[in-house]
Image: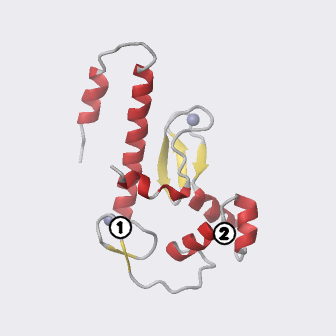
Amino acid sequence: MDKTELFNEYNIPYTCRECGGIMIFRGVGEYCCEDCKALDYDDYGKVRLYIEKRSGATAPEIERATGVSQKKIRNMLREKRFQIAADSISFLHCEMCGKSIRCGRLCDGCEIQYHRSLEENQRQLRQKNIKGTGINRQGDEGHRRFMRKDD
Ligand SMILES: [Zn+2]
Ligand SMILES: [Zn+2]
């Protein structure tokens, strides 16, 4: 299950800063709390937002505005298709399934799956915490819900 840790160099927000709810991945670095609908962004999302507002921003400028290190920004530029990325990207492969992709490290399907598994982990973590507070519930209902997977 280390796959889920592998890609968290972008500081993915797992839980909501407002209410502690689980942050659901919505694509392009954006996350939405499933409880209070607060929005948050990972490093990629922050950089992307900034570049959208100021196209042609330099790496030091982006670093100052977003707090994301220049090294990371450069890596992102190489991996993802920001407008200021000059490098021509040839063929990349999804790091999970090997499918050829045009940008990033994962194909669309695997990226979603990856985020869903993070969300699921977070959910289980939360359940454990709730159980750990002394209320000794059977946890049957929760279990049954997790076993139902509509693929
Ligand atoms: Zn929230
Ligand atoms: Zn894939």
Label 2 or label 1, whichever comes before in sequence order: 2
Residue at figure coordinates x 36%, y 52% from the top left: 2
Residue 90 pos. (x, y %): 43, 85
Left or right placement of residue 62 versus residue 73 in this view = right
Q: Looking at numbered disc 1 in the image, what kind of residue is underneath it?
A: Glu
Disc 1, SS? loop
Residue 127: x and y in percent read 40, 27
Which quarter of the picture shows residue 66? bottom right
Label 2, ligand 2: CB separation under 8 Å: no
Residue 93, quarter of picture: bottom left
Residue 112, which numbered label? none
Residue at position x 24%, y 41% from top?
149
- Above or below, 137 against 69 in this view is above
Residue on which disc 2 sits: 70
Q: Is residue 117 left or right of residue 11?
A: left
In this rendering, position of residue 77 left or right of residue 107 = right
Badge 1 is on which residue?
A: 95
Picture residue at 62% right of the left edge, 70% below the top: 71
Q: Does mark 1 have its CB less than 8 Å from ligand 2?
A: yes
- Say if 13 sits above or below 123 in the image: below
Amino acid type, callout 2: Gln
Measured as percent of width and height from the top left, residue 62 is found at 71, 67
